[in-house]
Amino acid sequence: MKLTVLGSGTCGSQMPGIENRKPPAFVVQSESQTIMFDCSEAVRFRLEEAGFNYVDINHVCISHAHPDHYAFVHFLQSIGCINSWLGPHNERIDVYAPRHITENFDALWALYVPDDPQRKNRIWPALHFHPMSNPDKQVLQIGEHRLKSFSVYHGHGRVDACSFRLEAQGKVFVYSGDTGECTGIRESALGADLFLCEASARVHDVENPHTYGHLTPRLAGDIALKAGVKRMVFFHYTGLNSDEEMIEDCRKSGYEGELTIAKDFDVLSF
Ligand SMILES: [Zn+2]
Ligand SMILES: [Zn+2]
């Protein structure tokens, strides 16, 4: 399995320490599948830069609707242009997302594309939406891969957000999305070979995981420790703490597994 980091940062740019860190987007590849996790603004440019042909993306998992994770209309328009100008290149995309997204996408689309609100033009790939929340813990197959979702706590508990767990080729990949402290993130991380975990609350902001809903490095470490995670990679990097401060804070949890902080265009095998 291979993880390519397309966006290790947040919604903010021009902040000290987060130069060249775009908002969250990742690609996980196995021998048979290519799956994108979160679809942030201008992701197609980063796909191109990382060597992907963006029209080849047929599976997109979206953690929640916050704009730093969800710019799917724009991505779809780019694919529509290729289908229109070069002929059919991508005729189907499966979208795995919280129900808040799957049930409201058509309204969002109509807002952006009032000339074709029902996507009747054949340039648009057929969209197959898979609600991954309400009820919690949806399980789906993508080929021989098992994708499971867990509802997580975020945005004062008012955001329909989920983490994803992908089991493939004997490996477990877990993507936290944005989350604070909750049972969902702890269950999703169990036994992960690679836990791609947000750590965007500041080291001293110990209330945040229980109020707004982001993790401190130390709490992420606690989750990883208790879940038996082999390797943890932090993303949603704010630059408000140094790498050294984040790692030191995480190690206070007692987590001793491999720990790195993602940078854009990192490629990790697991
Ligand atoms: Zn968010
Ligand atoms: Zn976010």
Image: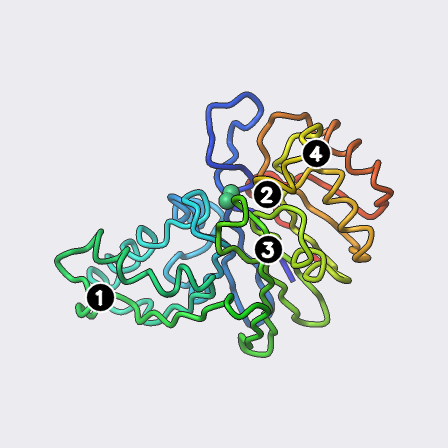
Q: Position of residue 102 (x, y in %)?
A: 39, 64
In space, the residues marked 2 and 4 are separated at their CA atoms by 10 Å
Asked if the residue at tag 4 contacts the one at tag 1, i.e. Cβ–Cβ closer than 8 Å, the answer is no
Q: Which residue is mark 4?
A: 206
Q: Quadrant of the N terminus?
A: bottom right
Q: Position of residue 5 (x, y in %)?
A: 56, 47
In space, the residues marked 1 and 3 are separated at their CA atoms by 35 Å
Kind of residue at disc 2: Gly
Query: Callout 3: few (<14), some (14-19), or many (20+) C-alpha neighbours within 10 Å?
Result: many
* Residue displayed at 68% across by 25% down: 242
Q: Earlier in the sequence, mark 1 or mark 4?
A: 1
Q: Quadrant of the C terminus?
A: bottom right
The image quarter in which residue 58 lies: bottom left
Label annotation for residue 152: 3
Instruction: Nearest to the eye among marks 1 and 4: give it.
Output: 4
Q: Position of residue 96 (x, y in %)?
A: 47, 65
Residue extending furthest toward the left: 115
Q: Position of residue 3 (x, y in %)?
A: 61, 54
* Residue displayed at 61% across by 37% down: 200
Label 2 beta carbon less than 8 Å to ligand 1:
yes
Q: Which residue is mark 1?
A: 123
Q: Which residue is mark 2?
A: 213
In space, the residues marked 2 and 1 are separated at their CA atoms by 39 Å
Q: Earlier in the sequence, mark 1 or mark 3?
A: 1
* Element on which disc 4 rests: loop
